[in-house]
Image (cartoon, grey):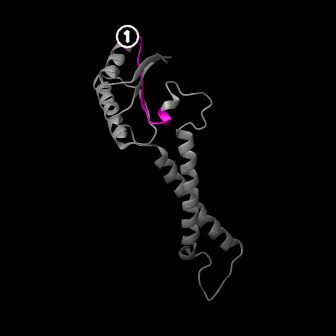
Amino acid sequence: MQGVLGAFAEIDATVEAIQDLRKKNFGDITVYTPTPRHELEDALDAPKSGVRRFTLIGGLLGVTFGYWVAIWISDYWPLVVGGKPVASWIPYTIIGFELMVLFGSLSTVFGMFALSRIPRLTMTVGYDPRFSHGDYGIWVVAGADRVAEATDVLRRHGALEVRNER
């Protein structure tokens, strides 16, 4: 994968460079930042995370399992008291809720790791250690015919360094 890496010291210049790259129809843009910044998220206009689906499915499975296991235990070892039903859903709501929270949170963590591909066994293309210490980086995938255009955009917006990488 061939592309251009630009390093920026200012967040405003980084945001403007991202917006300009998007106007010029550069599709695959990766941003490296030392801290999460909403300005960069807005400029990238990234799609919503799929982790929400893991949470929903895990929560639904948890509440279903919580009710099922409580009702199964009540039917297996019935305690008939004063004509009350053996399997009543009201007291089992607590167990269902607790297992919903447990399964939902565990599936959220699993989904986060799965969708972000953690652990990464190879180093990410375009990453520079200084992006963890205060600078911002933009990695743009560009074919051989568009490398000069991407380099020009990054330099015009004040990149400290621009280099081609594979």
Percent coordinates x, y for residue 5 in the rendering? 43, 22
Q: Let me know if residue 62 is in the magenta part.
A: no
Total number of numbered labels?
1
Q: Residue furthest bottom?
A: 82
Figure quadrant of residue 160: top left
Percent coordinates x, y for residue 102 in the rendering? 58, 59
Q: Is residue 32 left or right of residue 148?
A: right
In what element is the residue under mark 1? loop
- Residue name at image x 41 percent, y 14 percent: 143
Q: Let me know if residue 141 is in the magenta part.
A: yes
Q: Residue furthest top?
A: 145
| Residue sitting nearer the eye, 152 or 92 | 152
Percent coordinates x, y for residue 138 in the rendering? 41, 28
Q: Does 150 sit above or below residue 43?
A: above
Q: Does 30 sit above or below residue 151?
A: below
- 10 Å neighbourhood of mark 1: few (<14), some, or many (≥20)? few
- Residue name at image x 56 percent, y 40 percent: 114
> Which amino acid is tagged 1?
Asp
Q: Is residue 78 left or right of residue 133?
A: right
| Residue sitting nearer the eye, 66 or 102 | 102
Q: Which residues are magenta?
A: 131-146
Query: Which residue is labeled 1 in the image?
Result: 145
Q: Does 60 sit above or below residue 118?
A: below
Percent coordinates x, y for residue 72 in the rendering? 66, 68
